Image (spheres, rainbow, N blue to C red):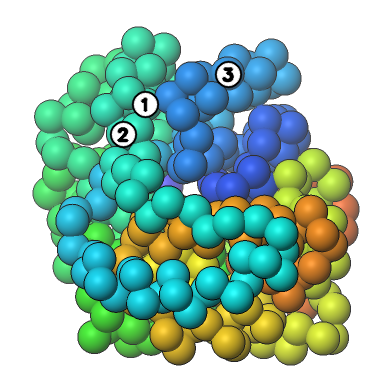
């Protein structure tokens, strides 16, 4: 592990920055206090909303933490296709006593304003999703004392992360829950991603910067596996989604281990970008027809998802989850970090004992 990355955590455990109200300050603080690296999600928040959460988190812990930022999205969506999808979703609105959202609510997620806040009030770590910033941005963050990462789903994307000047790359396997962090949304590549262990090996050959592994990691033995494959740390999302401090809706937490939700699937149904979720009614009925249109579809379906949660109907919610969701443990987040660290140590000891025979 690089010295800079080592200084950020006692255990090689990074809490994924799950947007949509899951990665709240209480969760990030608990993870950082336990020796991992907690993260806030700036996605779908205003710059001021992000700043207020940073202030709250700083009041909860003095340990390092991170903030994740979404990259602005290009104008690639076909308005006609979005209109067709809106027509298909029209029946959902009266069912949940709400209206469809406005698909033209903006594409940059307040990127420039958030960067301004993060440069004026530097945080220990900033990561980026859906692409990689310019070298100027990454250099400015480095001068401010911030360690930077960006997600990559292919070796070529990892090279782009290194060439832009990021300090480390997050290698995200196709098993991961939530949105795939692809740099370019290519519908022809849907479902063609790399499995995590294969991706780590290829990314390690492609770049010299540290690699953080992400994708359905739920147990300390899996952390041992990705470290053995060449990663410096593991990023876990679904594992922390079920914890006490997580801001996830109670129905979302319960669904992770509910036998009714037998599998996950990559879908564009909720946002217009490939994202892994538990298969429910909304995904089954609308997933096959959702266009490649992010964040247009996200804005369109947001009121439906919010209304479904308020109505207590998980069949209309975006139940983001990785392939390891059945292994979720309902624990305090700090305790989960300690359990993961103990499992990692036990796995390493068992492997060492086996090799000594």
Residue 231, label in figure: none
Of the numbered discs 3 and 2, the one sitting upstream in the chain is 3
Where is mark 2, residue-wise? Answer: 111
At horizontal 18% and vertical 63% (from top left) the residue drawn is 76
Please tell me which residue is depicted at 46% across the width and 42% down the height of the picture.
43
Q: Is residue 226 visible?
A: no
Q: Position of residue 351 (x, y in %)?
A: 65, 75
What crowding class fits label 3: few (fewer than 14 Cα within 10 Å), some (14-19), or many (20 or more)? few
Q: What is the secondary structure assignment of the residue under circle 2?
A: helix
User: Disc 2, disc 1: CB below 8 Å?
Assistant: yes
**Residue 196 appears left or right of 311:** left
Q: Which percent across, then down, holds residue 201?
A: 33, 74
Query: Percent x, y for residue 158?
Result: 24, 60
From this viewpoint, is residue 166 visible?
A: yes
* Label of residue 52 in the image: 3
- Looking at the image, which residue is at 49% across and 53% down? 101
> Distance between the Cα atoms at labels 3 and 1?
12 Å
Q: Left or right? Give the position of 252 relative to 35.
A: right
Look at the numbered disc 3 and give the secondary structure of its residue.
Answer: helix
Q: Which residue is mark 1?
A: 114
């Amino acid at each position: 592990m690089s010295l800079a990355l080592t200084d950020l955590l006692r255990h090689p455990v990074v809490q994924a920055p799950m947007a949509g109200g899951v990665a709240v300050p209480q969760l990030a603080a608990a993870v950082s206090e336990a020796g991992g690296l907690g993260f806030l999600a700036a996605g779908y928040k205003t710059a001021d909303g992000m700043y207020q959460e940073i202030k709250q988190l700083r009041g909860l812990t003095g340990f390092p933490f991170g903030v994740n930022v979404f990259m602005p999205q290009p104008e690639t969506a076909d308005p006609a296709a979005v209109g067709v999808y809106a027509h298909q979703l029209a029946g959902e609105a009266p069912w949940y006593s709400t209206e469809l959202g406005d698909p033209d609510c903006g594409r940059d997620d307040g990127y420039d304003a958030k960067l301004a806040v993060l440069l004026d009030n530097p945080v220990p770590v900033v990561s980026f999703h859906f692409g990689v910033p310019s070298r100027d941005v990454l250099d400015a963050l480095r001068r401010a004392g911030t360690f930077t990462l960006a997600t990559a789903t292919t070796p070529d994307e990892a090279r782009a992360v290194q060439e832009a000047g990021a300090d480390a790359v997050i290698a995200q396997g196709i098993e991961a829950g939530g949105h795939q962090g692809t740099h370019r949304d290519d519908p022809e590549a849907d479902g063609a991603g790399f499995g995590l262990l294969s991706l780590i090996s290829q990314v390690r050959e492609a770049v010299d910067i540290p690699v953080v592994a992400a994708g359905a990691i739920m147990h300390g033995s899996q952390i041992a596996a990705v470290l053995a494959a060449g990663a410096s740390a593991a990023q876990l999302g679904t594992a922390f989604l079920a914890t006490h401090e997580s801001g996830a809706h109670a129905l979302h937490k319960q669904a992770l281990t509910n036998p009714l939700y037998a599998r996950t699937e990559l879908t564009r149904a909720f946002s217009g970008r490939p994202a892994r979720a538990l298969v429910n009614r909304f995904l089954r009925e609308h997933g096959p027809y959702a266009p490649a249109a992010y964040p247009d579809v996200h804005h369109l379906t947001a009121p439906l998802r919010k209304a479904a949660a308020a109505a207590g109907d998980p069949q209309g919610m975006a139940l983001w989850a990785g392939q390891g969701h059945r292994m979720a443990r309902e624990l305090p987040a700090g305790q989960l970090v300690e359990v993961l660290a103990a499992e990692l140590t036990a796995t390493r000891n068992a492997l060492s004992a086996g090799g000594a025979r």
